[in-house]
Amino acid sequence: LTFLGLESSCDDTAAAVVRMEETGPRILASVVAGQTALHAPYGGVVPEIAARAHAEKLDLCVEEALAEAGVTLADLDGVAVTAGPGLIGGVMSGVMCAKGIAAGAGLPLVGVNHLAGHALTPQLTEGLAFPYLLLLVSGGHCQFLIAHGPEEFTRLGGTIDDAPGEAFDKTAKLLGLPQPGGPAVEAEAMSGDPKAVHFPRPLLDRPGCDMSFSGLKTALLRARDAEVAEHGGLRRQARRDLCAGFQAAVTDVLAEKSRRALREYLAHAPEHPAFAVAGGVAANATIRARLEQVAAEVGATFAAPPLKLCTDNAAMIAYAGIARFETGAQDGMDLSARPRWPLDRSAPAMLGSGK
Ligand code: ATP
Ligand code: FE
């Protein structure tokens, strides 16, 4: 099976071609066109600008992906597209584009949950088999999920307010660093002292694997204002220390809650000791290293996708589309875009996304 995948739920326009081979899935092409420069003047993603840019760029990304993969529409077995959750205008652009291609080329259309795309990435890139415990940690989400199948997830806990990616982005903004904040804060943190400023470790005193990250922003704001008041500005080293302190707090919380989630998961599935991380924040080296350590402590294997496939891309959508198609699922021309779409059907209304 060879699928074209489309992704346009936030500020990355992406197209990819993935082929299911006997040895496993292979990414034939993965094209990502970011919109960072377009949104930079506004200090955040502007939905209307994003939707227009997606609509303008999707066709080009598709052409590029097909050319890079060395295939034509006739070689495809289906078209997968992110149908939510995300910024509705962008998701609609992608769904319309996918419908056009599917109808024009007579191909099956498969709508994919963006979060399932992230959640299945460790299978695509690391060959991980079901079941496994997943920490999905991205710009809008943070949750522990047991992955049982392509569309079967059980949620063990998650953030009760902000997502860590969002917190990294806000931290960058408050410290005058560029967006996306994650990589910028990580780079600064490298030469900072994580102990110079104290940050809280929210909810560690409470049982279970729910998390909270909004308090970190308050702590950061207070420390920054104190620094500015005392020195008339943000000194270079102070900024590095703030980044390091913030990153260490996020890492500690994720590590401790992962330890608890792993214990709970292993009680259910002792014969499948596998822990994986996915989503944009999984690109953070400090966080990856700590989570790997946590897995090792309980004797679980650890899987993390390559950095480029942690953040938004269409290869994960093409793969999730194939996985869904293989279960016999398919969508019609009435496929609609869903701004909210929790992965776990028993989940409460989605938490933690200001986007
Ligand atoms: P969601 O998937 O929840 O809908 P999204 O698609 O916007 O949200 P992703 O593309 O998965 O999120 O991830 C983007 C987020 O990851 C951003 O908030 C970004 O700051 C963060 N991020 C990227 N690289 C790093 C890094 N090295 N360290 C920390 N955070 C990072
Ligand atoms: Fe994402």
Image (cartoon, rainbow, N blue to C red):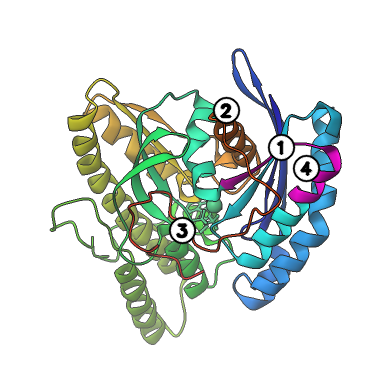
Per the image, label 1 sits on a secondary structure element best described as loop
- The image quadrant that residue 46 belongs to is bottom right
Q: Is residue 313 above or below residue 130?
A: below
- The image quadrant that residue 27 belongs to is top right
The residue beneath circle 3 is: 165
The residue beneath circle 2 is: 326
Type of amino acid at the residue the image marks with label 1: Pro
Q: Does mark 3 have its CB less than 8 Å from ligand 1?
A: yes
Q: Nearer the viewer, mark 4 or mark 3?
A: 4
Q: Position of residue 277 (x, y in %)?
A: 41, 39
Task: Give the Cα separation between the discs numbered 4 and 2.
Answer: 17 Å
Q: Does mark 1 have its CB less than 8 Å from ligand 2?
A: no
Please indicate whether residue 75 sits to the left or right of residue 334 in the image. right
Write down the region rendered in magenta.
98-112
Residue at figure coordinates x 36%, y 28% from the top left? 131
Per the image, label 4 sits on a secondary structure element best described as helix
Decide which of tag 1 and tag 4 comes sooner along the chain. 4
Please indicate whether residue 238 sits to the left or right of residue 184 in the image. left
Type of amino acid at the residue the image marks with label 4: Ala
Type of amino acid at the residue the image marks with label 3: Gly
Instruction: Specify few, some or many for label 1: CA neighbours under 10 Å numbering under 14, 14-19, or 20 or more.
Output: many
Instruction: Specify few, some or many for label 3: CA neighbours under 10 Å numbering under 14, 14-19, or 20 or more.
Output: many
Q: Is residue 21 above or below residue 325?
A: above
Task: Give the Cα separation between the discs numbered 3 and 2.
Answer: 32 Å
- The image quadrant that residue 10 belongs to is bottom right
Task: Give the Cα separation between the discs numbered 4 and 3.
Answer: 34 Å
Decide which of tag 4 and tag 3 comes sooner along the chain. 4
The residue beneath circle 4 is: 102
